[in-house]
Image (cartoon, rainbow, N blue to C red):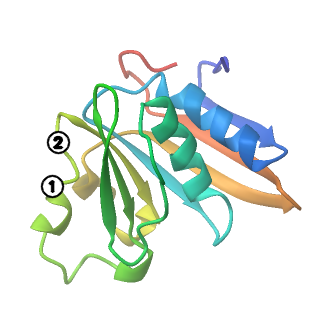
Amino acid sequence: MIAFPSTHRKAVRSACPAETEALAADVAGRLVAGDVVLVSGELGAGKTTFVRGAARALGVRGPVVSPTFTVGARYRGRQVTVAHLDLYRLGNLDDEDPALLADYFSGETIAFVEWPERAVEESLGHVVLRVALEHLGGDARQVTLEWRHGEGRRP
């Protein structure tokens, strides 16, 4: 398990997709129902790979793919529903009905939001963690985890 300094911010190097998924699985063990995780990075940075690793750790079986064309997907885990949103195609949410995404954020769901910069953070629910993925060349990535202060089980 990764130890976080008192700042609750940690940058980790991932050499391959399997390491990114393992890191996400570790993160998933710190999440509780009602939490929202914002996952950002360029196209191909590994956002969906990160979400897949967390979803697997939460007990999701079957394919976990980017919901780019459907905006969101819900998966049943062992004890919680996992919501996976991809806001890339929305442009921004200023002109959208606020209820469009409301069903993905509940006290019984852990939600992962790709391309969160397309929305106002306050509209995304109880954000506990920001994840930023950056290309380092080849399959290597830098994954920066920034936890919100004052969160119960978090780091």
| Res 91 → quadrant | bottom left
Q: Mark 2 points at which residue?
A: 106
Viewer-side residue, 104 vs 38: 104
Question: Can residue 91 be seen at all in this image of the molecule?
Answer: no
Q: Is mark 1 on a helix, strand or loop?
A: loop
Residue 58, image x, y percentages: 43, 31
- Depicted 130 relative to depicted 118: above or below: above
- Does residue 143 appear left or right of residue 109 in this picture? right
Callout 1, which amino acid?
Asp
- Does residue 147 appear left or right of residue 124 in this picture? right
- Does residue 146 appear left or right of residue 102 in this picture? right
Callout 2, which amino acid?
Ser
Q: What element carries label 2?
A: loop
Q: Which residue does the image show at 89% across and 61% down from the upper left?
A: 138
Residue 67, image x, y percentages: 41, 67
- Does residue 38 appear left or right of residue 33 in this picture? right
